């Protein structure tokens, strides 16, 4: 159920999911917002700041073909409602490539949001720091990315005429939204920077040698998500805002439990951005 004239993997996964959602609500979101590990409280922050209508919450398990996440800190629920009077869809958790899913499923949040009518994706994620000047606890607004996952998110996709999905990715992340998000964060005094997201296949964290390699390639932060959703959003004609929460500074060891604990402190900032920028989505 993507807009006409855009590419698709042709797997028929999105249509029954959108149909199941439409059986529960006719809300047409302006944006899909993906909340990464431990960032589910961003919804509460956005509602507290901007107000909200009564939402509809649908477990992923109730959506045919939408795999429930297996990663701790991902609630696996779709929240559909209004923030400051604007309809939005919060995806509380995502599906990861490292969980064994193919790329079309790893980008399912974007595909479903587009099928519901959204024109913007806000992609948040917990990441590791690579730039020594950026402390843990910072939010890095994504300007560009390195796809080191070993596969293109658009492999096998076709346009309606059957041609391959040759998509311009010279500007995946919307500069206007990125500038606005930086302004919101700096005004609030949140430790903030901007840079390049390196996407690794995971699920293991990086070795010291890999960390050095990523720095030399120009990456600012490293994670295991975001890129499949972002590239597919670009292919579907959507605007993208990438928000990476640095759970550990460059060179520091990390566990997933520490990621979840640190991410809770970023949820308020993510909620603030949604509340203050929702009119721009």
Image (tube, rainbow, N blue to C red):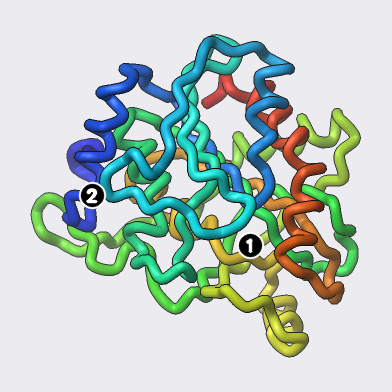
Which residue is label 2 attached to? 13
Left or right: 211 as drawn, with respect to 81: right
Q: Are marks 1 and 2 in contact (CB under 8 Å)?
A: no
Q: Say which of 259 and 208 sits in front.
A: 259
Question: Element type at marker 2?
Answer: loop
Residue 278 coordinates in the image, percent (x, y): 58, 22
Q: Say which of 252 and 60 sits in front.
A: 60
Compared with 242, 79 (above or below) is above
* Residue depicted at 60% across the width and 35% down the height: 176
Q: Mark 1 to mark 2: distance in Å?
A: 28 Å
- Mark 2, Cα crowd under 10 Å, few <14 / some 14-19 / many 20+, is some
Quarter of image, res 150 = bottom left
* Residue depicted at 57% across the width and 49% down the height: 74
* Residue depicted at 79% across the width and 52% down the height: 261
- Could one spot residue 138 in this view of the protein? yes
Residue 188 coordinates in the image, percent (x, y): 86, 30
Query: In the displayed image of the protein, which residue is found farthest to the bottom?
Result: 209
Compared with 186, 95 (above or below) is below
Total numbered labels: 2
Reading the chain from its start, which is encountered first: label 1 or label 2? 2
Left or right: 120 as drawn, with respect to 143: left
* Residue depicted at 51% across the width and 70% down the height: 147
Residue 159 coordinates in the image, percent (x, y): 17, 54
Which residue is label 1 attached to? 197
Question: Element type at marker 1?
Answer: strand
Residue 40 coordinates in the image, percent (x, y): 64, 39
């Amino acid at each position: 159920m993507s807009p006409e004239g855009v590419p698709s993997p042709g797997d028929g996964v999105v249509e029954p999911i959108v149909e199941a959602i439409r059986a529960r609500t006719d809300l047409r979101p302006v944006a899909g917002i993906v909340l990464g590990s431990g960032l589910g409280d961003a919804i509460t922050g956005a509602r507290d700041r901007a107000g909200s209508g009564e939402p509809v919450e649908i477990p992923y398990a109730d959506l045919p073909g939408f795999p429930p996440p297996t990663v701790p800190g991902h609630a696996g629920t779709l929240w559909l409602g209004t923030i400051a009077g604007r309809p939005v869809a919060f995806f509380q958790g995502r599906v990861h490539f490292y969980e064994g899913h193919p790329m079309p499923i790893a980008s399912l949040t974007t595909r479903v949001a587009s099928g519901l009518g959204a024109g913007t994706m806000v992609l948040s994620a917990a990441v590791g720091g690579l730039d020594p000047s950026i402390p843990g606890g910072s939010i890095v607004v994504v300007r560009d990315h390195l796809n080191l996952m070993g596969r293109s998110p658009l492999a096998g996709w076709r346009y309606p005429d059957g041609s391959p999905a040759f998509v311009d990715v010279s500007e995946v992340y919307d500069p206007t939204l990125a500038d606005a998000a930086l302004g919101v964060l700096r005004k609030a005094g949140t430790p903030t920077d901007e840079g390049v997201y390196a996407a690794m296949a995971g699920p293991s964290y990086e070795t010291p040698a890999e960390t050095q390699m990523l720095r030399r390639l120009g990456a600012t932060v490293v994670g295991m998500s975001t890129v499949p959703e972002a590239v597919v959003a670009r292919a579907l004609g959507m605007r993208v805002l990438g928000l990476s929460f640095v759970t550990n500074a460059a060179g520091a060891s990390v566990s997933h439990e520490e990621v979840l604990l640190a991410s809770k402190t970023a949820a308020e900032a993510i909620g603030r951005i949604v509340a203050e920028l929702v009119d721009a989505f």
